[in-house]
Amino acid sequence: MDRGQAPADAEALVTSGDAQHPANLIPSLCAKFWTLGWGPRLHCAVGGAEGAHEEDSQQPQQRTYLRSPPCHRPSQCTPLFLAAFERRGAGCCIHTHSQWAVLVTLLLESSSSDVFEINNIEQIKGFPRGPSRPGNLGYHDTLRVPVIENTPHEEDLTEHLEAAMDRFPDAYAVLVRRHGVYVWGDTVHKAKTQCESLDYLFQLAVEMRKLGIPWISNVPRIGPDRP
Amino acid sequence: MDRGQAPADAEALVTSGDAQHPANLIPSLCAKFWTLGWGPRLHCAVGGAEGAHEEDSQQPQQRTYLRSPPCHRPSQCTPLFLAAFERRGAGCCIHTHSQWAVLVTLLLESSSSDVFEINNIEQIKGFPRGPSRPGNLGYHDTLRVPVIENTPHEEDLTEHLEAAMDRFPDAYAVLVRRHGVYVWGDTVHKAKTQCESLDYLFQLAVEMRKLGIPWISNVPRIGPDRP
Amino acid sequence: MDRGQAPADAEALVTSGDAQHPANLIPSLCAKFWTLGWGPRLHCAVGGAEGAHEEDSQQPQQRTYLRSPPCHRPSQCTPLFLAAFERRGAGCCIHTHSQWAVLVTLLLESSSSDVFEINNIEQIKGFPRGPSRPGNLGYHDTLRVPVIENTPHEEDLTEHLEAAMDRFPDAYAVLVRRHGVYVWGDTVHKAKTQCESLDYLFQLAVEMRKLGIPWISNVPRIGPDRP
Amino acid sequence: MDRGQAPADAEALVTSGDAQHPANLIPSLCAKFWTLGWGPRLHCAVGGAEGAHEEDSQQPQQRTYLRSPPCHRPSQCTPLFLAAFERRGAGCCIHTHSQWAVLVTLLLESSSSDVFEINNIEQIKGFPRGPSRPGNLGYHDTLRVPVIENTPHEEDLTEHLEAAMDRFPDAYAVLVRRHGVYVWGDTVHKAKTQCESLDYLFQLAVEMRKLGIPWISNVPRIGPDRP
């Protein structure tokens, strides 16, 4: 993707006629996700470009931004996006405060668990097996999303996020207890659909809990073996 | 309905000034249903035309598509759409991963049931009695939607879907456990309204369960007999 | 309100440049309510004008319609609208299949009740005291909405609706068990806001029930007496 | 912000080409919040300008309005907005009948509590510590929102609102039992985001209660001390 010219004036609004340019993709994703009730705070980074619906706070600038007016300092979660970009080669990383994500971490906290696991739900097929494994998860596979504990300062999450990435090398997302979720993907499109699929599964998991249905089940396999 | 010319170039975007043309109907339905939270994966086929919000995967092409660029292979659920078109003469078939549909199949699984049944709800009147019976269901009739077990590969659902169609010759929908629902109708409009009515009933059924209200009831008939 | 000319051709689409004309008001209300999830079936009548999102069915035409093409016969609930227009002088009547309305009637059925009652909720102030009483309900007043049993044929509801209107002369709405609600108002605007307020209260009532909070409470009065 | 000229004609519609002018900000906020399901009644005041989605009622006019046609008297909650403007120097005050806010007050009533308290949720960081304290709340801080009892006449809330402001000098919001919430902020943007964050927390709190998760928890601090 053509990232275009770095603007001469850091305060200038970057514009592009290309719908795939981060200057267009990021606001469009933010607007779309906002309507889905993913909380007033949503962060999305495409490569080095970052867009925010969030109160930005103290943090040194660490790389080139698409647009970096002095009145908006880069968000605290930049190092977390960098972890996804650099460790996993992600093309896009999305951070939300989705209530379903937060509720799942609270339910897991009650059982002292630090990993969300669900299987035998069709939507699981929306996730790749992992960077080193071809294809997507199957219906009977277990999707695992690690949970890390929240820290008072978002930048302190980085080392825990990186540790979780190491512990779960095939994961495309990390939940943060009482906070939200980070989801990444190889491309903007994949990050978006994986974020949507994950939120679908978090919401389903909360409703399953309300109805007394366990997240992990043992369902017999039907149909022939296929490659 | 005029299906128009098969495009000379399989990659060309098919366009039409006719709002009822599948090239216009399908994207419009997909966009509308997306906003209803019917999951990021939604499939809709109008006759031979198919539109998708879904990761397409391996499957041989079996009939002429409205538009079939090499980069998007036909979706796995094509044989399922064909079953509706060929066995029931459906004009349109819609497949969703609606959470309400999935939750209903999970609740039925707990009671080892393979059919969703509900009666004495006004919205039931939105469904025809069946292909061989005139008119729509009445308020006191029981709407029955069979449930089939999910398979790891979507194309393997076909024989089970067809068996369910045979077992329930009057059904206009089949639930797939832990997956979603297939709904069809004689026309695009009927498929759409039946899909909406069914989702309404699935959501209502889940809420009824949360409130301890049974799906099947015995309600006395009021008013005169009418034809 | 100027109802304009009766169209010479009953099939002609009635149009008007006046935003308050029923030909504009009705589609606008229908579209708006649809997005609120009030079910795929919604009926709205303004004076003699009627718009529908509903499968119309067998019924003799009983008065002049704004537009009455032979392919769409007047809806079954016309006599119910007439009851509101003629008995209460309503300027607009709205009928929805709101799930919250249906769930409230189901919860009341469990306790063999035929009236919804709620008090001490601010939103109650959105309702007039009644046609013969000035002003709106107060915070401590009890809003009462009668419930009638559903009938297989919607036109058979009329006599029960009229009886409920007689029994509750101050009501601006009637719930229909397992079906939905009829709400009317002196003007289109009042019918719309009363319909919204009522749906708000039905949804709140269902959530209160889930949380174990009773609909009727005894809350001490605070503040001075005022006229 | 330039408030512009007071219109010579009190009935004239005030218009402005400035998107930040109250004549544009207020309708835009009202429309946005309406779609979030914050109840048909929503009030928003920017400085002396007020916009409403509410049935206005009896009350003497107490200050200059942006637009004050005789047919719409100022809303009953004007003195409440004045309390926020004058006691806290707020730039904007928003009043909603959010169902989540009402449900939180009902849950607190069951435990005879007059303050909503929640801690260890990331979204808490969206609130300032208070007018006299720099920075925002931290993750482990407890957000406190006082609850006052509702009065039959909204203007009688004023003294209770002011007393709650005195009792909780750092609060940016006051809940009204069985009624809704008042939220204010230094600017329109801050009032809007604080209102959104608070509604997020109210909804989360209701869902936590349904799932048996307490609002106040004791979570160990992780990470280094930072300024």
Image (tube, coloured by chain):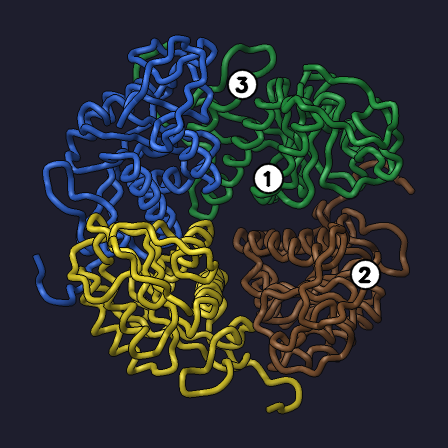
Chain colours: A blue, B yellow, C brown, D green
Q: Is residue B1 above or below residue D160?
A: below
Q: Which mark is residue C15?
A: none
Amino acid beneath label 2: Gly
Amino acid beneath label 1: Ala
SS class, disc 1: helix
Q: Earlier in the sequence, mark 3 or mark 1?
A: 1
Is mark 2 in CB contact (under 8 Å) with mark 1? no
Determine the chain carrying the residue at label 2: C
Residue in view at x 64 percent, y 55 percent: C199
Residue in view at x 7 percent, y 56 percent: A227
For disc 3, the marked residue is: D128
Is B12 left or right of D5, judged from the image as shown? Answer: left
Residue D26's x, y, as percent?
A: 67, 30
- Asked if one can make out residue A121 in the rendered structure from this viewpoint, the answer is no
Dot 3: within a 10 Å radius of its alpha carbon, few (fewer than 14), some, or many (20 or more) residues? Answer: many
Residue in view at x 57 percent, y 65 percent: C41
Residue B32's x, y, as percent?
A: 46, 53
* Badge 3 and badge 2 both on one subunit: no
Determine the chain carrying the residue at label 1: D
Is D55 left or right of B135, judged from the image as shown? Answer: right
Q: Nearer the viewer, residue A82 or C61?
A: C61
For disc 1, the marked residue is: D101
Q: Give the quarter of the image for residue C30.
A: bottom right
Q: CA distance from mark 3 to mark 2?
A: 57 Å
For disc 2, the marked residue is: C4
Q: Quadrant of the C terminus of chain B?
A: bottom right
Determine the chain carrying the residue at label 3: D
Residue D224's x, y, as percent?
A: 31, 13
- Asked if one can make out residue A162 in the rendered structure from this viewpoint, the answer is yes
